[in-house]
Amino acid sequence: MVLALALLVSACGAQPAAGPALFGDAQTLVRAATEQTGKAQTVRFSVAMTVADREATATGEMHFAEPGWAMKITHTADGVTSETRVVDGAQYVSIPEQARGLTGGKPWGRYPADSAKGKELGAMMRESGQSDPAQVLDDVRKGGTIDRSEQTTLDGRPVSHYWITVDLGKTSGLAEMAGRTAPMELWLDADQLPAQMLFDFSGLASEGDPPMGPMTMRYTGWGEPVDIAAPPADQVAELPAG
């Protein structure tokens, strides 16, 4: 009985595992995280965000090192699911059954890598928070300031949690964004790899655009094999390049 009570008291007083060491400035944080992501080169991710009070989700996987940058992502919004792939620079988009008259009945459409639409989609996917962690970290390096941090746990794992203000003028290079900021949160795991990111887009929508709420990114499977391939050629139709 005495031993049992001693063990109980010890367990109640136990402290949770400390998260990885905390960084005091955004540039040092990014250097450490970028080094680790560069070694991993692959990751799986999930996204949840709100646009005009409607939730949209996505899951995907990517190889984000050059050469060979590639991504596969499945979106779900309003109960409709679609898929986009980027392979060798070309953009492949799934075509809803009701729209396949435009593709001769084929379930996939392709924008060539050198087409205007292909370049536009590729840049959008790389630069959006929903895709490349290296791009997000670079934005933090350019315009991020750590407001506070803590050691905590996420899904039972020790992590370091940062609250960061991002200067949008520095990250976007757009004059109209000068002086505008946005908050984000970043969780790094014990290997200094991103485990979760949260972006708050509230108040950033331009006049006439639908209001956007927070977006949460979760990252798993760093360094594990990913399966990203172009759809079979006989299932793909070329889309207008303009």
Image: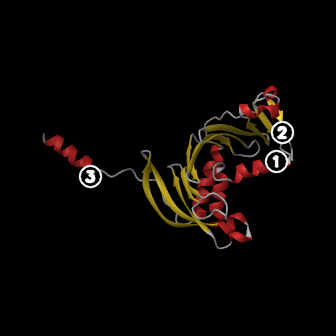
Kindly identify the amino acid type of the residue bearing the numbered disc 3. Answer: Gly
> Image quadrant of residue 224?
top right
Does residue 156 show up? yes
Label 3 environment density (alpha carbons within 10 Å; few <14, some 14–19, many ≥20): few
- Say whether residue 20 is visible: no
Q: Look at 82% across and 47% down and name the residue there.
A: 117
Q: Which quarter of the image is occupied by the N terminus?
A: top left
Q: Which residue is found at the position 62% from the left and 58% from the top?
A: 31
Question: Which secondary structure lies at badge 3?
Answer: loop
- Residue at (59, 65) in percent of width and height: 203
- Residue lying farthest to the left in this orientation: 1
Mark 3 vs mark 1, CA separation in Å: 59 Å
Q: Position of residue 103 (x, y in %)?
A: 81, 32
Rendered image quadrant of residue 175 = bottom right
According to the picture, the residue beneath numbered tag 2 turns out to be: 239
Residue 164 spot, x, y in % from top left: 55, 64
- Compared to residue 236, the image places residue 13 above or below, namely below
Q: Mark 2 is on which residue type?
A: Leu
Residue occupying image coordinates x 13% and y 42%: 2
Q: Earlier in the sequence, mark 2 or mark 3?
A: 3
**242 sits to left or right of 56:** right
Number of numbered markers: 3
Q: Earlier in the sequence, mark 3 or mark 1?
A: 3
**Is there CB contact under 8 Å for labels 2 and 1?**
yes
Q: Please say if 135 is above or below 90.
A: below
Residue 123 horizontal/vertical position (percent): 75, 52
Q: Which residue is mark 1?
A: 117
| Crowd tier of the residue under label 2, counting other residues whose Cα lies within 10 Å: few below 14, some 14–19, many 20 or above | some
Mark 3 = which residue? 13
Q: CA distance from mark 2 to mark 1?
A: 9 Å
The residue mark sitting in front, 2 or 3, is 2
